[in-house]
Image (cartoon, rainbow, N blue to C red):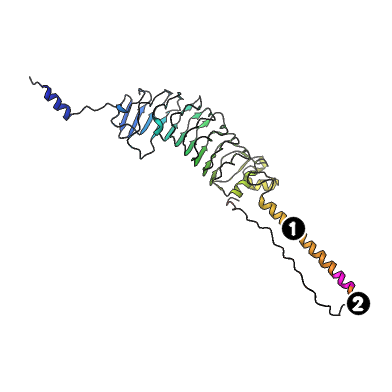
């Protein structure tokens, strides 16, 4: 019978080293780990993978993401990519994020995406705690009951991109992105079923260059809803149900005088008489006196134009009156001296008043208008 001594066993171990098993319910390829939510056994541990994963995908999510689900993972060995966690609820199943679900050393996760999940409990201030390095938050499909005003507080976000995710509350809290870092440059809230966006919703987002609030159910906007977006370059606002009255006419002036580029037209839904018409045409028809942060009851340009016209008209009237008085005085002198109107009169100095219009620097006009 063939027998191995201790030295033979050691030799075999050197030739065929023991390989760590992938965690139950998971597969791995290089820095990517994919786990089936119905079969995995959290918490995930770096030591259970041959390489600590940088990109983690949870499929077939349905239920509660438990506390410390990823607490055994350490920073991965591939810092060149945007390390991420992606969760997908096939068939629009439910997702509950337990407090401290991302506790541990998850500060290196830069992207969190949630697809087709029904988050009926909403997202509270503690749900994303532990992801202090989060840069991008993305959702697609599914629904979220509501957000807390502090859901994103303390995060270093660059963008929030939500598309086709129904917000049951039909609104977002005032200032809910205010403490999500100062570097955010892009906000997408597309097709969420929003009926209102409160003033202060985008407070502190002075670096945002692109805002997308298209395809919602918005009928109007607070006049100061966009005030904080001083770096905004592109605004997507189509596909809403704008009620075109003077209450929303400030948008025309705001877009015109800030130079923001509209991605599509602002088209009226109501009143019925204006359905399908462009907002800027309707406000002209209504003769609205607008009030915006960029212009008071009338735009600076309009005020200057009216003032300048009034000044010129007044000066012109003054010059005409002065000429008439001068002519009358000259005729009277000629009559007293016996000179006829054909007698050459002494030459007098000719005074010409030069009217200089007020300096007006008209802001860049938007191509939409």
- 71 or 365, which lies in front? 71
Q: Position of residue 313 (x, y in %)?
A: 76, 59
Classify 10 Å Cα crowding around label 2: few (below 14), some (14-19), many (20 and above): few
As helix, strand or loop, the secondary structure at mark 2 comes to helix
Q: Is residue 278 visible?
A: no
Image position, residue 362 (x, y; %) = 62, 55
Q: Nearer the viewer, mark 2 or mark 1?
A: 2
Measuring from the top left, give residue 89's x and y in whole percent.
43, 28
* Residues drawn in magenta: 327-332
Q: Quarter-wise, where is residue 3 in the image?
A: top left
Name the disc covering residue 134, or none.
none
Q: Is residue 194 left or right of residue 296?
A: left
Q: Is residue 264 visible?
A: yes
- Which residue is at a point 55% across and 46% down the rendered structure image? 264
C-alpha separation, residue under disc 2 versus residue under disc 1: 39 Å
Q: Quadrant of the N terminus?
A: top left
Q: Which residue is mark 1?
A: 311
Identify the residue under disc 2.
337
The residue carrying pointer 1 sits among few (fewer than 14), some (14 to 19) or many (20 or more) residues within 10 Å by Cα, namely some
């Amino acid at each position: 019978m063939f027998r191995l001594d201790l030295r033979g066993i050691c030799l075999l171990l050197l030739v065929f080293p023991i390989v760590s098993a992938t965690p139950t319910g998971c597969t791995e390829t290089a820095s990517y780990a994919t786990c089936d939510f119905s079969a995995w056994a959290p918490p995930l541990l770096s030591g259970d993978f041959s390489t600590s994963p940088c990109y983690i995908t949870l499929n077939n999510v349905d239920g509660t993401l438990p506390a410390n689900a990823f607490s055994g993972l350490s920073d991965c060995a591939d810092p060149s990519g945007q390390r991420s966690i992606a969760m997908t609820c096939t068939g629009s199943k439910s997702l509950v994020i337990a407090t401290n679900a991302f506790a541990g050393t998850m500060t290196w996760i830069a992207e969190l995406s949630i697809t087709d999940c029904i988050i009926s409990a909403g997202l509270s201030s503690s749900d994303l705690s532990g992801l202090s390095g989060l840069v991008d938050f993305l959702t697609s499909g599914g629904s979220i009951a509501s957000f807390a005003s502090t859901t994103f507080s303390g995060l270093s976000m660059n963008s929030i991109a939500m598309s086709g995710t129904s917000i049951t509350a039909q609104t977002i809290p005032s200032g809910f992105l205010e403490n999500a870092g100062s570097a955010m440059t892009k906000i997408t809230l597309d097709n969420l079923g929003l009926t209102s966006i409160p003033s202060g919703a985008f407070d502190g987002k002075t670096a945002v260059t692109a805002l997308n609030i298209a395809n919602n159910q918005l009928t109007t906007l607070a006049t100061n809803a966009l005030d904080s977006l001083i770096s905004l370059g592109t605004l997507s606002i189509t596909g809403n149900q704008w009620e075109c009255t003077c209450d929303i006419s400030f948008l025309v002036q705001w877009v015109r005088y800030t130079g923001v580029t509209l991605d599509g037209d602002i088209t009226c839904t109501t009143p019925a008489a204006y359905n399908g018409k462009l907002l800027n045409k309707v406000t002209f028809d209504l003769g609205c006196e607008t009030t915006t942060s960029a212009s008071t009851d009338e735009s600076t340009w309009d005020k200057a134009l009216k003032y300048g016209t009034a000044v010129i008209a007044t000066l012109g009237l003054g010059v005409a009156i002065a000429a008439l008085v001068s002519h009358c005085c000259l005729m009277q002198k000629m009559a007293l001296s016996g000179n006829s109107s054909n007698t050459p009169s002494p030459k007098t100095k000719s005074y010409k008043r030069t009217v200089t219009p007020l300096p007006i620097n008209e802001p860049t006009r938007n191509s939409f208008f």
